[in-house]
Image (spheres, coloured by chain):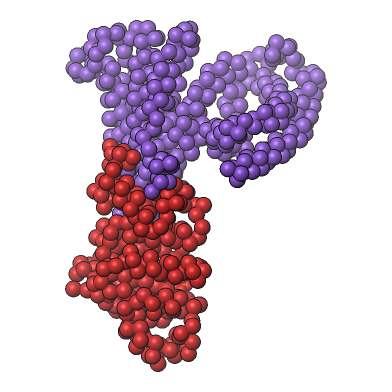
Chain colours: A purple, B red
Amino acid sequence: MSSSIQNPGPSKIPCYGIWCVFALTIMLLPFFFTSRFSISLFSQIGISCVFALSYNMLLGQGGMLSFGHAVFMGLGGFIAVHALNLISENTLPVPLELLPLIGGLGGAFFGSIFGYLCCRREGTPFALITLGIVELFASGALMFPSFFGGEEGVSGNRMIKNTLTGFDFGSEIEVYFLIGSWTFLCVLCMYLQTQTPLGRLANAVRDNPIRASFIGYNPSHVRFLQFVLSGFFAGTAGGLFIIRYEIIAYDALGLVPSGNVLFMTYIGGVGHFMGPILGAILISILQLVLIHYTEAWQLYFGLLFMAMVLWAPGGLSWLLIVHQPVWKAGLMSKLLPSYLQALATGLIFFLGLIIFIEINYHLSLSIEPGAPLELFGLVMDGHSVVPWSTAISCLILGLWLFRHSVKMVAAQWDAVMVIITKKTLER
Amino acid sequence: MPALTLNNLHKNFGKARVIHGLNLTVEKGERHAIIGPNGAGKSTLFNLISGLYPVSTGDITMNGRTISNLDSHLIHRLGLSRSFQVTNIFMGMSVFENIRCALLWPAGLGYSFWHLCGRLKGVNAKAEAIIETINMMERRDVLADVLSYSEQRTLELGVTIASNPDIILLDEPTAGMSHSETEQAVALIRKVTEGKTLLIVEHDMSVVFDLADRISVLVYGNIIATDSPEKIRNNPAVQAAYLGSSIKTTTC
Ligand SMILES: Nc1ncnc2c1ncn2[C@@H]1O[C@H](COP(=O)(O)OP(=O)(O)OP(=O)(O)O)[C@@H](O)[C@H]1O
Ligand SMILES: [Mg+2]
């Protein structure tokens, strides 16, 4: 019996400390980063977190690869914006603060309709059906302009009288706190859901549907309920989106935002609850920053995605987790030199890649291809040999050095693992 | 009323007739073993009874109720539980979680997403008790994937009996185990199936003759004899068809 006391195992209720830190972070962030830009970025991150976590309810927890998750966020958003307009006409007596809930119910409603269609299958057929659903909405939305608002979309105005808190939500910070509270609530609920029978069974069905049916559960049923709940939280994210942007158009239902959430979740890591949160934070920031500097931002995203799939298939959260024992053993200093070397050589390669991509983009797609290109404060002429030869030599040299340093990293890693294994054996 | 009745059961895979015209009655509370050469259709028979495969023709009744072509989870809920020839547990979960998952449906929690598993005192205590029964307390929080083979088999037995089923189907529970592991496994099977109906497929004859009240011999999709161990041992038809003369030592 003693081992059960020493080892609480994964069944324990989470420590409350983490949640307090999380809540405090949400509360204090806007006091440290006070610019309008950062506060609106935080709102965006909050929405993305909810959306990416809802996606991981399918992908990570249930093993369901969906290509159409944005449909549920989008539909939740459309329902929320119509609800918002009804509220401002005083036909719907709901305070603004509860608008995301309406979006969520909309998401769950459509989740149950489409979940019924796709959850009887798993694996590839499931993925293909979700792809069909996206296509259905991407092309069908324009046929119903009264609901989807045609090309311009549907807009609303969040500054309405009917509120619980008395704020008028005219300022960015008030919107932030509303979105932040919902984010906290949704993240908490989605975490707790992983600890419920349905949440555990979603894992079970993902790994072994046959055994799941021999402990009394219908695998399709488990998938279906998981799908509906995931649709609920996606719809909630859609409601938050309306509060933040006050407008939504048909392209919110398309393949691009669906791909984006897959991207965030995967880069953050599907194997850990924290993963999608990390992914949402990183991708939201990168997106905003990159759009500022380059037109080719989607290309860089593609490269990042490929690099992650190749070298860190478990995502950021996985990278953190595998380093935890190293950190605890105080051996990070052994790894750092090789990491820095890999970083430096990788940067050389990446620099070559950037020059290459940017010149190409400039010559083929910019408004004035004849004009010189400015990159990192340097002026480059796309028609001279210098930038091209620089790019190519950086690429070749960088790649050669990088491959070398990757071997170094691997060797150092193995050495550190040997030390850790020895230490644990001694104990 | 018998626990299981199989009546004129047929199963074809395309043109291959794997089970043809099989009849079998398993009485309540008996330990019934099925023996037969490789490829005779023993696992297929289990898959038919447990609803994993649809039957081609014929019917299966459990406690007087027709269960042929019912979904596996429904058959399980009626009180039939099984293990597989190839270990079938949740490899990504700990021993404790494997057992607890098997207890959720019987505890009436269904598909609940509003109960926290950590707070289910009754279920958790029961899971502990089952782990105690299968002697795996020391391995409680170990991932199933990293258990040794015989530990995984033991865990599967635990998962199988966790829901307190009336009828238990075990498909070669000791295959691949060493001699001492087999002895322990047999003792454990005897303990956890006390008072229940057991249907077991096993190649190890010492296990079969040790455990079984009755034995059925399955050869090429048909049962050629059902009798007490003593009579099966001396049945000339059985010896000719399957066992040869080496009945006392066969452990193929
Ligand atoms: N899903 C299937 N599709 C096609 N044929 C199958 C299928 N399952 C089993 N069979 C065939 O049915 C026959 C019986 O297989 P089964 O696994 O039931 O034998 P068994 O008696 O359990 O043998 P063993 O002692 O090797 O476990 C075999 O010839 C096998 O090839
Ligand atoms: Mg078999």
Q: Classify residue A159 by image quadrant.
A: top left
Quarter of image, ligand 1: bottom left
Query: How far across and down, in percent of the image, does residue A161 sit?
Result: 24, 9
Residue at position x 42%, y 31% in the image: A53
Query: How far across and down, in percent of the image, does residue B202 sit?
Result: 42, 73
Q: Nearer the viewer, residue B139 or A235?
A: B139
The quadrant of the picture occupied by the N terminus of chain B is: bottom left
Residue at position x 26%, y 68% in the image: B195
Answer left or right for A427 relative to A233: right
Q: Classify residue A27 by image quadrant.
A: top left
Q: How many marks?
A: 0
Q: Nearer the viewer, residue A245 or B195?
A: B195
Q: Classify residue A133 by image quadrant.
A: top left
**Image: A382 above or below A69:** above
Answer left or right for A104 relative to A261: left
Query: How far across and down, in percent of the image, does residue B38 sit?
Result: 47, 76
**Residue A103 appears in view:** yes
Residue at position x 47%, y 16% in the image: A41
Q: Residue furthest bottom?
A: B236
**Residue A140 appears in view:** no
**Image: B217 above or below A279:** below
Residue at position x 62%, y 41% in the image: A423
**Image: A164 above or below B38:** above
Q: Nearer the viewer, residue A2 or A293?
A: A2
